């Protein structure tokens, strides 16, 4: 929450009236209480809430949507929900393979996999699958796990113990329930008091007083021999767990990529620009990247379909969603 607190401080220093921007810190129970109070306030004729925007889980978003629909005394609310995702990445055989691997890693390992748009369902054309897997494991094994403030670190800790345990639970599901093949990672990474990693010397290039022994570190998990019905393929993990599958033709992979309850992002890697636009047009996702992934600028609208949310953030669309349109018609005769 540090950036949000800093934003509140900047607003205050710039003269924004007190109370116009407020930050409430808390855990899930705090959020639950806010939703309940909001729901109760809808029954008041003095309700002045004009818009609600939420970023988080589908379950919580659904509760907020239900609560906002219960206002029968005053007005309907503008509602933006930016929820979960289980985004597909499609890698065709004519792509720049090294670039595709780099961006696929970014689409899965960035922020320790704690990104709603991450492309965790990776579909690779059968003809390049073996080479893709070999290079993917090779490049992933070079990543440095350590303190997040160290410039040499590629992967820091998970946000909490609970989230770390959730990811490890899904790794276990992938192995023992789904029957997928864990070919790399999926383990907790520990450090001793001297910052030695799992018994090996860890060159973190940082001060000795940076104790990593209590950190919630994980190694990225790569699963192969997956199918579309596995839990690790269908359910959002919100951590570093990649499921890699093969495909043979365009129609097949489009059908499989769209066979999900989510629709936040998708990625395509190919050197055939006509194919890229054809596939992008048929993917059911709010954002589709071609030969890249997870790039987003403030000018770009950000939205999801299906259970990934409603409404749009960023860009002109977001600006319009935070204002009320009014038409004034004047007859001068």
Image: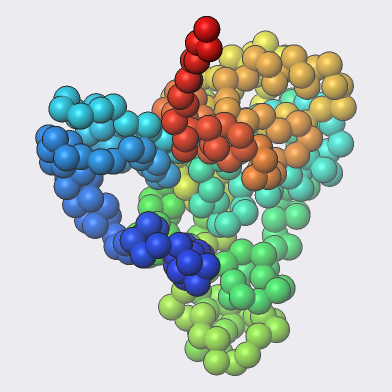
Please indicate, yes or no, whether residue 20 appears anywhere in the rendered image: yes
Viewer-nearest residue: 3 or 228: 3
Colour setup of the view = rainbow
Q: Against 73, is 188 above or below?
A: below
Q: Residue at x 50, y 72 (%)?
A: 13
Residue 25 placement (x, y as % from top left): 33, 64
Residue 136 placement (x, y as % from top left): 73, 47
**319 left or right of 206 in image:** left
Q: Residue furthest bottom?
A: 208
Image quadrant in which the N terminus is located: bottom left
Q: Residue at x 59, y 83 (%)?
A: 196
Q: Against 51, is 22 above or below?
A: below
Q: Residue at x 25, y 41 (%)?
A: 48
Q: Quadrant of residue 162?
A: bottom left
Q: Residue furthest front?
A: 333
Residue 8 placement (x, y as % from top left): 45, 65
Viewer-nearest residue: 294 or 87: 294
Residue 46 placement (x, y as % from top left): 16, 40
Q: Residue at x 39, y 58 (%)?
A: 21
**137 left or right of 44 in image:** right
Report the number of discs.
0
Q: Quadrant of residue 91?
A: top right
Viewer-nearest residue: 62 or 4: 4
Q: Residue furthest top?
A: 333
Q: Against 238, is 25 above or below?
A: below
Please indicate, yes or no, whether residue 133 appears anywhere in the rendered image: no
């Amino acid at each position: 929450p540090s950036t949000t607190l800093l934003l509140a401080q900047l607003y205050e220093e710039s003269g924004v009236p007190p109370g116009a921007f407020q930050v409430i810190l808390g855990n899930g129970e705090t959020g639950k209480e806010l939703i309940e109070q909001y729901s109760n306030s809808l029954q008041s004729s003095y309700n002045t809430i004009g818009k609600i925007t939420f970023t988080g889980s589908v379950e919580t978003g659904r509760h907020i949507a239900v609560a906002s629909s219960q206002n029968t005394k005053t007005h309907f609310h503008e509602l933006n929900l930016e929820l979960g995702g289980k985004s597909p990445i499609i890698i065709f055989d004519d792509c720049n393979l090294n670039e595709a691997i780099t961006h696929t890693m970014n689409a899965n390992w960035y922020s320790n996999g704690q990104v709603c748009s991450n492309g965790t369902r990776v579909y690779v054309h059968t003809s390049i699958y073996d080479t893709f897997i070999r290079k993917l494991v090779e490049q992933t094994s070079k990543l440095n796990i350590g303190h997040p403030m160290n410039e040499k670190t590629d992967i820091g800790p998970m946000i909490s113990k609970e989230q770390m345990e959730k990811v490890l639970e899904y790794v276990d599901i992938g192995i023992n329930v789904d029957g997928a093949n864990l070919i790399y990672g999926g383990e907790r990474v520990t450090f001793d008091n001297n910052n030695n990693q799992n018994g090996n010397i860890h060159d973190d290039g940082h001060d000795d007083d940076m104790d990593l022994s209590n950190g919630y570190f994980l190694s990225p998990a790569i699963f192969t021999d997956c199918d579309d019905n596995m839990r690790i393929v269908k359910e959002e993990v919100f951590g570093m767990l990649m499921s890699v599958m093969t495909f043979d033709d365009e129609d097949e992979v489009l059908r499989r990529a769209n066979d999900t309850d989510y629709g936040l992002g998708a990625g395509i890697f190919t050197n055939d620009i006509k194919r890229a636009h054809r596939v992008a047009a048929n993917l059911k996702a709010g954002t589709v990247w071609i030969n890249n992934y997870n790039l987003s600028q403030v000018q770009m609208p950000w939205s999801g379909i299906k259970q990934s949310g409603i409404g749009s953030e960023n860009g002109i669309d977001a600006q319009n969603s935070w204002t009320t349109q009014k038409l004034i018609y004047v007859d001068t005769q």
